[in-house]
Each structure stands twice: as structure tokens, then as C-alpha cells.
Image (cartoon, rainbow, N blue to C red):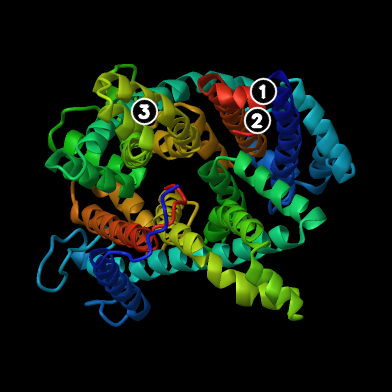
């Protein structure tokens, strides 16, 4: 366990600011997706199949003559939105369950923690592939498949935090002043334990992004014609010799995005500098 | 020590019961009628009469818990049912594919460790040097690369462009190169990052500076540092086994490597439920058992845990 640094260095803070702005921009582009596209991402054209990059199609066209650049931008929406939303939901559910089980103990605690143990007995991607494969494709099912084990991380962390903070004088004070359990949990405890939880959440965005893209790549995640990087790479790889740009563009987009989000995770950790391991 | 391990084993049995229940439940709630799936997979035209017969012969008309109990007891005896597609016993299919997956995952794990341990050590000892910065950069990039992407890029550059390696799996050792690289690069990146962090933490402890100040040879100090950092490093390796298993499904599918992962993906495409079920149950069992073994290793490495008999 590293010691909590009281005054995080300014360098770490400014790096965090840079990556917050970068990720913010990426999320903005993904939300605006249809606007910055040079062409209609779903318009096919038999006259412009497998075209190399040119003025009209900045990143070329794929096997159906669709604009790769526009599809990569539309794919940003799917990939970034799904990963961020998934981390948000698993974070909220996991934290809530973990806090309740740490606070009340007893049967709730046993139930939640045993459930987490069982979920952790499955290798995450193996279970995700099985769940997504059985439920069939679609973004919702892919997110469910990844989230089914994802919440356990936050639940365990939140429970441990509540257990260690529960006997602090200020929590006793809040109790004595007559605050209800819900008020204490959300108002008193949550702000004091958010650090390690946020670090985990920030590092998980990249992991979830890779996971969902992997499912889509296998054909059991987001399905055509909806643009998604993993499925674009998979669909275009058979035409790799003819149209390498159709594979390379979504690949580059995936690598860049995951790296930027992972950098953000590292920066959050450096600034909060909480020893939660990696 | 014996009691602690016995406790672990009992815990493991509970976990496996729950895992098997969830695995069974997953197939039970799967959309569509299992009898129709079986007939479809065999290419038999479905009529109401045949459907009834198949349902009865598969035992689908029985209550849920009876079906689960029957399935679980058979699984315990090593009978995982038979494939809808070709009627072969699932256990036999899994065992046949296991060898190829073991070759792929173990060689990838070995490669990742072989690269990660020396670089993490170098990086931690020469903190903030050029070597450290370069190692950190590469491990960061490796950690951010999805394995399917590495596969596609390797295929494009090494097979399509340079024509150095075969595109798909064959018998030659050459065909192992790309799948192994694709599987080990992200894991290697993660190993270097986490090993480095663990080593730095250990190096920062007072006993290290104390020993160096007393003039103890660095070689001996390093030995204790490695010994003490072994447990957290082993934990990292244990967790990566799950990543390897999930990753092998992707990699085997891409390279047509005839292992467990490809078997599972084919089963998903064919809606061959018993095979998917068997695969999930089998990999989870292996995963849980490996982590139990690692847990036992902790006690072997650290005598304090043996005496306390507590959790590692």
C-alpha cells in the first residue's frame, strides 16, 4: 500500500486535465457523431467499392462502398458510449451493493459477497462470450454480458471501504445526530471512499471497450449495419489485401481511444494516488 | 496448513455447485426451444410430433430442478451430454481440443513471463532512466492493444505483406508464432506494469535501504526482494489465466486453431448448447482449480501464512 500523498504534484494534475479534455472531446465527437461525418455512414454504392482514400472519402470506402471515415466516426459513438455507460452502470450497482453489504452485514452481506465470489469463478470473457452468444447479438446483450461480472470489482472495494470507515468517529457522530442509514451512506461515507472506486472505474473504461469490441469482432456483439469498430475490423479483414484502409482505420481508432482512456485511468490514479493495486 | 486448505476445498465445492447451477440456468433461459435447436442442428425437419418425442427423450418435460440435478450428477461423472450437431460426447470433444489450447495458452504465458520479469526488474531497479521510460511506454501500449487487433495487424503485415508466416493454423511450429504473439502481447504489457509496481513497492521498504547501508551485497538484497514480491506477482499471474482463457477463444477463432475456444465459438454459431455448457463449466473449473493451487503456493512461499493458517 502506497501512502496517500497529501499534495499531489502539479504535473500529475495538469496531465489529468489534459486527458480529461481529450476524453471529453472524444465523448463529444461520439455524441455529435452524425454531424462531423463527411458522408452518410450507411449509404452503399456499387460504383465506389474498396476505393482508396481520396478527397470525397478521406479514409477510402469498404466493400459495400460505404465511407470508412464516416463509419469510424459513427463507430466512436457505439464504442465510447457503450463502454462509458457500462462502467457507469456497473460502478453504480456494484458500489450500492457493496456499501449495503458492508453497512448491514448479515444475510445481505453473505448473499452479495457469495454472488460476487461465484461471478469471479468464471473467467470474465469466457462468461461474456457464452452469455452474448446465447442471447444473440446486439449492443444491449453485449453490455449485459460484460457487466454481469463487472460489478463485483466495485462491490468488493466499496464493502471493504465501508467496513474500514464504519467505526470512524465522524460516522458515529452522524449516527448519534439521528441521520438515517441512507443519509449516512450517501452523504457521509460515499464522499470519503470515492477515491479508490473512481480509480478502478477510470481504468475499467479501456477494459470494457476492448471487451465489447472483442465480442463485436466475434460477431456476437454489436451487429451490422450499426457501425462499431470491432465488427468493422472483422468484416473488412477478408478484404485486407484489396482495401487495407477499411481495416487499418477502425484499428487505429480503437488503439488510440483505448490508449487515451487508459492514460486517463493512470492520471486519475496518480492524482488520487490510492494504493488499490493495478 | 492442512485445515486452511481443507477450508478452501469446501469453499471450492460450494463455488462449483453455484457455477454449475448458473451455467445450467444460462442454457435453460436461452431463447428458443432446445428440442427444436437439436433437430435444426441435425438438419431434421421439425414437426409437432417429432418435437414432442425429442422433448421427452431429452427430458425437457421434467421440472427444472430435476433437470439440473440430473445434469449436474452426470457432469460429476464426466458425462457432459452429447453435441446436438454430431452426437459426439461433449467431454470427449473438450478433451480432444484441450491439448491445442494448452499449447497455445501455456506458450503465450511463458513468453509473456520471459519478457516481463527481466524488463520489470530492470525498469524497477533503474527507475526513471531511459530504459525505464521506454519499457513503460511499450508496456503501456501492449496493455492497450486488444488481442484481436494484434492478430489482424500481424496477419496483414507478416502474412499478407511480407509472406513470412502462414495465415492459419497448421502442424508446423511456424503457425504458433502469430497466435502466441497476439495472446501474449497484452498480457505481457500488463505483467510488466504490475510487476514493476510490486517491485518498486518492495524496494522502497526500510529493510532494503537498511541492508544496503549495512553493506549487504546487492545480489542478496535482490534475492529477498524477489522472494517477497513473489506473492503479489503470483496473484497477477493467477488473474491472467482468466484473460488467457477468454483471449484464446478470440485468437483460436481468428487463426482457426482447433482448440477449446474455436470449439466453443463454433458451438455458439451452431447453437450447440451442450458444447457451450460443457465449455463454460470446464474452463471455470480449470480457472478455479488453478487459483486454488496458486493459493496453496502462497503458503509454500511465505511460511507466515502457514502458521497463521489464514487467508492469503
Q: Quadrant of residue A44?
A: bottom left
Q: Residue at x 20, y 58 (%)?
A: A50
* Residue B310 on image: x %, y %: 66, 32
> Can you tell which mark lies on residue B83?
2
Vertical placement of residue B261 versus A153, above or below: above
Q: Quadrant of residue B151?
A: top left
Q: Chain of mark 2?
A: B
Q: Nearer the viewer, mark 3 or mark 1?
A: 3
Q: Nearer the viewer, mark 3 or mark 2?
A: 3
Q: Chain of mark 3?
A: B
Camera-nearest residue between A243 and B210: B210
> Is residue A145 rendered to the left or right of residue B215?
right
Compute the Cα span from label 1 to label 2: 6 Å
Q: Earlier in the sequence, mark 3 or mark 1?
A: 1
Q: Residues within 10 Å of mark 1 (few under 14, many from 20)?
A: some
Q: Residue at x 34, y 17 (%)?
A: B171
Q: Look at the numbered disc 2 and give the secondary structure of its residue.
A: loop
Vertical placement of residue B155 versus B8, above or below: below
Camera-nearest residue between B184 and B296: B296
Q: Is residue A48 visible?
A: yes
Q: Residue furthest front?
A: B214
Q: Look at the numbered disc 3 and give the secondary structure of its residue.
A: helix
Q: Chain of mark 1?
A: B
Circles 1 and 2 in contact, beta carbons < 8 Å: yes
Q: Residues within 10 Å of mark 2 (few under 14, many from 20)?
A: many
> Is residue A187 rendered to the left or right of residue A267?
right
Q: Residue at x 23, y 56 (%)?
A: A252
User: Where does label 3 land, which residue?
Assistant: B225
Amino acid at each position: 500500500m502506497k501512502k496517500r500523498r497529501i499534495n499531489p504534484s502539479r504535473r500529475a494534475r495538469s496531465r489529468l486535465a489534459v486527458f480529461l479534455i481529450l476524453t471529453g472531446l472524444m465523448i463529444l465527437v461520439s455524441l455529435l457523431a452524425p454531424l462531423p461525418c463527411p458522408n452518410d455512414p450507411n449509404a452503399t454504392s456499387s460504383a465506389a467499392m474498396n476505393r482508396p482514400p481520396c478527397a470525397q472519402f478521406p479514409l477510402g470506402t469498404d466493400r459495400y462502398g460505404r465511407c470508412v471515415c464516416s463509419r469510424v466516426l459513427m463507430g466512436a459513438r457505439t464504442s465510447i458510449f457503450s463502454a462509458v455507460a457500462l462502467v457507469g452502470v456497473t460502478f453504480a450497482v456494484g458500489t450500492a451493493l457493496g456499501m449495503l453489504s458492508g453497512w448491514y452485514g448479515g444475510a445481505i452481506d453473505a448473499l452479495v459477497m457469495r454472488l460476487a465470489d461465484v461471478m469471479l469463478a468464471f473467467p470474465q470473457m469466457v462468461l461474456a462470450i457464452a452469455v452474448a452468444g446465447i442471447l444473440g447479438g446486439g449492443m444491449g446483450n453485449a453490455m449485459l454480458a460484460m457487466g454481469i461480472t463487472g460489478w463485483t470489482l466495485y462491490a468488493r472495494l466499496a464493502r471493504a471501504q465501508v467496513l474500514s470507515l464504519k467505526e470512524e468517529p465522524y460516522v458515529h457522530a452522524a449516527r448519534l445526530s439521528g441521520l438515517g442509514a441512507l443519509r449516512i451512506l450517501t452523504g457521509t461515507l460515499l464522499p470519503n471512499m470515492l477515491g479508490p472506486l473512481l480509480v478502478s472505474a477510470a481504468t475499467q473504461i479501456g477494459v470494457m471497450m476492448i471487451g465489447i469490441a472483442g465480442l463485436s469482432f466475434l460477431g456476437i456483439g454489436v451487429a451490422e449495419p450499426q457501425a462499431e469498430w470491432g465488427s468493422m475490423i472483422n468484416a473488412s479483414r477478408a478484404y485486407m489485401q484489396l482495401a487495407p484502409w477499411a481495416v487499418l482505420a477502425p484499428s487505429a481508432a480503437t488503439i488510440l481511444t483505448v490508449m487515451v482512456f487508459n492514460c486517463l485511468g493512470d492520471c486519475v490514479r496518480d492524482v488520487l494516488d490510492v494504493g488499490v493495486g493495478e | 496448513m492442512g485445515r486452511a486448505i481443507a477450508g478452501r476445498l469446501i469453499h471450492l465445492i460450494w463455488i462449483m455447485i453455484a457455477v454449475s447451477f448458473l451455467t445450467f440456468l444460462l442454457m435453460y433461459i436461452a431463447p428458443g426451444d432446445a428440442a427444436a435447436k437439436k433437430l435444426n442442428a441435425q438438419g431434421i425437419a421439425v414437426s409437432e410430433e417429432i418435437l414432442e418425442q425429442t422433448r421427452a427423450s431429452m427430458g425437457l418435460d421434467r421440472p427444472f430442478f430435476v433437470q439440473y440435478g440430473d445434469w449436474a450428477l452426470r457432469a460429476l461423472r464426466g458425462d457432459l451430454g452429447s453435441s446436438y450437431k454430431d452426437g459426439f460426447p461433449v467431454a470427449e470433444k473438450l478433451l480432444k481440443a484441450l491439448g491445442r489450447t494448452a499449447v497455445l495458452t501455456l506458450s503465450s504465458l511463458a513468453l509473456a513471463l520471459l519478457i516481463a520479469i527481466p524488463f520489470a526488474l530492470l525498469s524497477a531497479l533503474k527507475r526513471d532512466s531511459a530504459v525505464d521510460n521506454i519499457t513503460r511506454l511499450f508496456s503501456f501500449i501492449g496493455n492497450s492493444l486488444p488481442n484481436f487487433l494484434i492478430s489482424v495487424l500481424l496477419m496483414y503485415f507478416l502474412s499478407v505483406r511480407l509472406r513470412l508466416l502462414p495465415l492459419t493454423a497448421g502442424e508446423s511450429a511456424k503457425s504458433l508464432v502469430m497466435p502466441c504473439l497476439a495472446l501474449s502481447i497484452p498480457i505481457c504489457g500488463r505483467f510488466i506494469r504490475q510487476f514493476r509496481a510490486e517491485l518498486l513497492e518492495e524496494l522502497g521498504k526500510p529493510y532494503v535501504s537498511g541492508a544496503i547501508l549495512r553493506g549487504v551485497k546487492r545480489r542478496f538484497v535482490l534475492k529477498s526482494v524477489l522472494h517477497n514480491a513473489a506473492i503479489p506477482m503470483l496473484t497477477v499471474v493467477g488473474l491472467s489465466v482468466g484473460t488467457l482463457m477468454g483471449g484464446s477463444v478470440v485468437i483460436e477463432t481468428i487463426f482457426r486453431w482447433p482448440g477449446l475456444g474455436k470449439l466453443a465459438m463454433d458451438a455458439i454459431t451452431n447453437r450447440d448448447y451442450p458444447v457451450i455448457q460443457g465449455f463454460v463449466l470446464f474452463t471455470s473449473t480449470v480457472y478455479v482449480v488453478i487459483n486454488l493451487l496458486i493459493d496453496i503456493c502462497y503458503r509454500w512461499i511465505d511460511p507466515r501464512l502457514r502458521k497463521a493458517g489464514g487467508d492469503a
